[in-house]
Image (cartoon, rainbow, N blue to C red):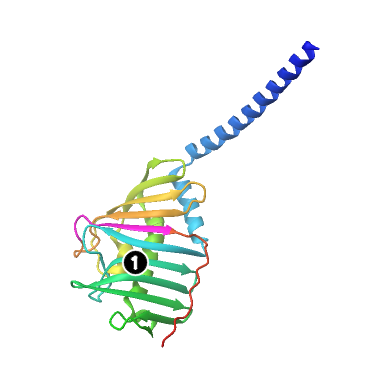
Amino acid sequence: MLFKKISFVCAGLLIVIVLFSISCSKNTESDMTLKNMSIDQILKKTKIAMRNLNSYQLDLKHSSGTGTPVGNTGLTLSEASATINLPDDIYIEGNLLFGNIVLKTKYIKKKSDSYYINPITQKWESIEDNSNPLSLAVNGLNEILFSTIDQIESPTIDSSNTNSYIIRGEISPSIFNTLLGETLEKSLETKITIDKNLYQINKIEISGQASKYDDPKIIRKLTISNFDKPFDISVPSLK
């Protein structure tokens, strides 16, 4: 009787050991896959993941300086938040600086129709698509988002944690052409945070002067979130 109990205990222990070994083996294989993945493979997977998005949110902030000039409008974008349903639905709100004056405004695009909040009257008005600086800002932010991952030079893995790859490299100021128009020639430093599981970009930081009007220590911080979450972007009332 005692021998049978010992046999059952041994059998149970053997099963636990086998299951534990299988689990460890799978985890080890997974860890090795991550360790053996090259930067080129990570970037390739990221490009595919980002190109397959249906919707996302972009948030822009700055460290140092007043912000990013918007084309030849005489306005500076200090911060902005945009939600985008591809291909044609956009909602963005932001703070534009005209000298020392802060202009708070919003912009909506629904297919071929565009609207904005007049910063003076704070009422919605219809507008031609390319006549509003926030429309230009959205195009510029998208250019930064996709050009950074496409054009990053000399990439290295700066660090890696359980959830993210952090990749550093250099990028040409030309990715700011839509926003800034005329840009400098020297390369800018960039840091990209990429989700390890989904290969989506969570954050892009770009350091350095992209134009002669930039603060020398400016860092532009672009956060990307709410992937493939459909946004309720509707036509505003013009009353």
Q: Main secondary structure of the magenta part?
A: strand
Stretch in magenta? 215-224
Q: Residue 223: within the magenta? A: yes
Examine the rendered structure and indicate whether residue 199 appears above or below residue 74: above
- Indicate the position of residue 161 as horizontal and vertical percent values: 43, 40
Seen from this angle, which residue lies furthest bottom?
Answer: 239
x, y percent for residue 42:
47, 47
| Res. 236 image quadrant | bottom left
**Which image quarter is the C terminus in?**
bottom left
Q: Is 113 or 124 nearer to us in this picture? A: 124
Vertical position of residue 53 compared to residue 39: above or below: below
Q: How many marks?
A: 1
Give coordinates of residue 199: x percent, y percent: 49, 51
Look at the picture and state if 124 lies above or below 29: below
**Image point (43%, 50%), residue name:** 194
* Residue at (38, 70) in percent of width and height: 138
Q: Is 99 displayed left or right of 236 in the figure? A: left
Residue beneath disc 1: 80
| Residue occupying the point 81% across, 12% down | 1
Residue drawn 74% across and 14% down? 6
Judged from this view, the residue extending furthest toward the front is 1
Taking the magenta stretch, the answer to whether it contains residue 140 is: no
Residue type at the position of mark 1: Ala
Q: Callout 1: 10 Å neighbours few (<14), some, many (20+)?
A: many
Relative placement, left or right, of 97 versus 116 is left
Which corner quadrant of the image does residue 145 belong to?
A: bottom left
* Residue 22, image x, y percentages: 64, 30
Q: What element carries label 1?
A: strand
